[in-house]
């Protein structure tokens, strides 16, 4: 008969521990795939939110009755037009005016354009803001109208 310890022994080489190299390669591959997926989703989000090289800022603003006079500085690619949404709000934060301003309609070679715009408002304006800008035309939603899919 065999001794009790001999019956419990496993054959040599049959039940060796798994290779750590395969586990490491799998972990590296999964990490690379995850990073590629995050980069692709980030790129889609960036493009979807207007990844144009057009930016605007309000330099000065002043209320003139029910109108808001604002001086804007817009950075854009030279030779192109820019379309920027500007708006005005009351002290309480209620929006009283919004419109799209076409900047540099003739597409001059300047990279930075300064302009003065007067925004008609429906109430007493207190602040002026430059919103989204794009090198492509922007359309504003019509209040009370649901866009068709």
Image (cartoon, rainbow, N blue to C red):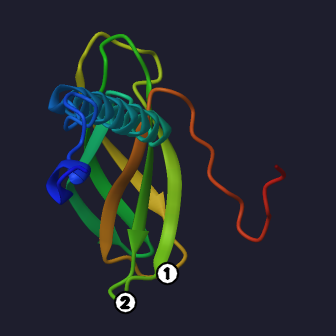
* Image position, residue 97 (x, y; %): 50, 67
Which one is closest to the eye, mark 2 or mark 1?
Answer: 2
* Image position, residue 101 (x, y; %): 47, 42
* Image position, residue 127 (x, y; %): 30, 71
Q: How many marks?
A: 2
Q: Dot 2 corresponds to which residue?
A: 92
On the picture, is 120 further left or further right than 8?
A: right
Camera-side residue of 140 and 11? 11
State the image quarter where residue 103 is shown: top left
On the picture, is 60 further left or further right than 42?
A: left
On the picture, is 52 further left or further right than 83?
A: left
Q: Dot 1 corresponds to which residue?
A: 123
User: In the current view of this chain or complex, which residue is farthest to the bottom?
Assistant: 92
Whether 92 is drawn above or below 86: the answer is: below
Camera-side residue of 13 and 55? 13
Camera-side residue of 128 and 67? 128
CB contact under 8 Å: marks 2 and 1:
no
Q: Residue at x 28, y 42 (%)?
A: 56
Whether 148 is drawn above or below 21: the answer is: below
Q: CA distance from mark 2 to mark 1?
A: 11 Å
Whether 117 is drawn above or below 69: the answer is: above
| Badge 1: residue crowd in 10 Å (few <14, some 14–19, many ≥20) | some
| Badge 2: residue crowd in 10 Å (few <14, some 14–19, many ≥20) | few
- Name the secondary structure under disc 1: loop
User: In the current view of this chain or complex, which residue is farthest to the front?
Assistant: 1
Q: Residue at x 53, y 53 (%)?
A: 99
């Amino acid at each position: 008969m065999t001794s009790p310890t001999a019956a419990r022994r496993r054959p040599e080489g049959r039940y060796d521990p798994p290779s750590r190299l395969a586990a490491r390669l799998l972990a590296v591959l999964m990490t690379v795939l995850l990073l590629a997926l995050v980069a692709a989703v980030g790129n889609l989000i960036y493009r979807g939110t207007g990844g144009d090289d057009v930016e605007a800022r309000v330099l000065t603003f002043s209320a003139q009755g029910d109108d808001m006079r604002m001086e804007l500085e817009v950075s854009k690619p030279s030779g192109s037009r820019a379309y920027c949404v500007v708006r005005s709000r009351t002290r309480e934060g209620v929006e009283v005016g919004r419109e799209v301003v076409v900047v540099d309609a003739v597409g001059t070679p300047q990279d930075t354009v300064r302009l003065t715009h007067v925004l008609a408002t429906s109430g007493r304006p207190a602040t002026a803001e430059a919103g989204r800008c794009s090198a492509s035309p922007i359309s504003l939603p019509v209040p009370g109208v649901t866009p068709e899919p």
